[in-house]
Image: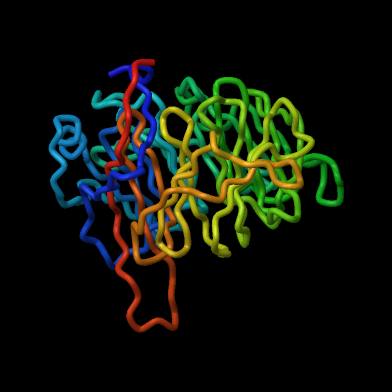
Amino acid sequence: MSNNAYLYEYTVGSQRIECIAESDEDCVIYRAVEWSPDGTMLAASTDDSTLRIYDVNTQVTQYASGEHRMSPLAAYTTIAHAGTLLGFAWYPHMNRDPAANCFIESVRDHPLHLCDTQTGKVRASYSAYDAYDTLMSATAVAFSHDGTSIYAGYATHIGRFDVHREGPPVELTQTTPSRRSRDGLKGIVSCLATNNTHIASATLSGQLALHTPDTQIACVWRVPVEYGGTGVTHLRWAPNNIHVWAASRQSEFIVAWDIRDLRAPCAVVRRPGRTMQRMQFAFDASGRHLVVGQADGRVVLHDLNALDCDQSNALVQDDPNSVQAHGDLVAGISSHPYYPLLATASGQRRFCDPNPAPNCLRVWSVPAQYYCA
């Protein structure tokens, strides 16, 4: 199936968003979820430092054939880790071919590991060391658009690894000259996002940067204080590869910038709920809708073509379509690369609630209108 064969638009007026699959592991707290590039698998990270791989090819096939019946989700590969799982990313050309069926993961106090999806075994390791010859833990990880390089973000560095060569990075760039310096990118690198021309990074100090493919910093800017510049926790390129969107902790806004003019945000979307937890957002394949999970368990679809200008000249969306997807915070959300399907995952730690809402991973079908690209 070609990625550009069809695009779709959500049309959720009088039709219902339906749940077509659900996991039965309500005792775990989900942190993130991602569809595989071929749309047949889901990877979900949980609070117990475990990565669960779900084969959803059956559910996707049933949906494509017009069958929208409910079915259970069960992880067929469960990968537990000795340290905290800091991030993971699918190989961009991943498909059912065993050679391409893999992903990269970052675990605290461990090298980066390229793992086999079917068995969970390590295929290759990539490690970077600081000036004191101490192994650095990657706090963010991403593949290049063509799948030939792995980018890793560290406390004070960004590295690029050749996928075909284990060991040290090909390039390792310091994000700032020194701790006291005001130049460069300040803070621990928390997010990385790649497209076909640039690498975008963000830090827990609220700064963002664009990098060239060899990890050199091209420009640096900051999330405005009024939109919660306390630390970026999720970063994603829009499908047009021009707008980069970021969400910060303790913020009720998701902010976008046009990389052709970074003087001010070009769009702002409200997301109620202040939390220190990472909360994902996603785009549909056409790039028209921004899909956001909220702290109250709702999943919201923002039509980016219906944004209105506010007094600050940024574009703000206030009247979205939504569905009550979970009974607790929606931490993970991902859009299928081909079909109008969403994967959502819920969970947060509650220390004083004797009856917390059950956490689960769900797959949703969204009413859509197809047209030829």
The outermost residue toward the front is: 14
Residue 155 in the figure: left or right of residue 346: right
Name the quadrant of the N terminus: top left
Name the quadrant of the C terminus: top left
Query: Residue, x 35% and y 42% (percent of image)?
Result: 12
- Comparing 119 with 132, the one in front is 119
- Comparing 254 with 186, the one in front is 254
Q: Residue 273: percent from the left, percent from the top?
A: 54, 63
Q: Is residue 108 something that shows in the picture?
A: yes
Q: Residue 292: percent from the left, percent from the top?
A: 47, 49
Q: Residue 307: percent from the left, percent from the top?
A: 59, 40
Q: Residue 177: percent from the left, percent from the top?
A: 82, 41
Query: Residue, x 67% and y 44% (percent of image)?
Result: 130
Residue 58 in the figure: left or right of residue 107: left
Count of numbered badges drawn on the protein:
0
Colouring mode (rainbow / by chain / secondary structure / one colour): rainbow
Q: Is residue 14 above or below residue 3?
A: below
> For residue 56, which quarter of the picture?
top left
Residue 214 in the figure: left or right of residue 348: right
The outermost residue toward the right is: 181
Q: Is residue 139 something that shows in the picture?
A: no
> For residue 242, which quarter of the picture?
top right
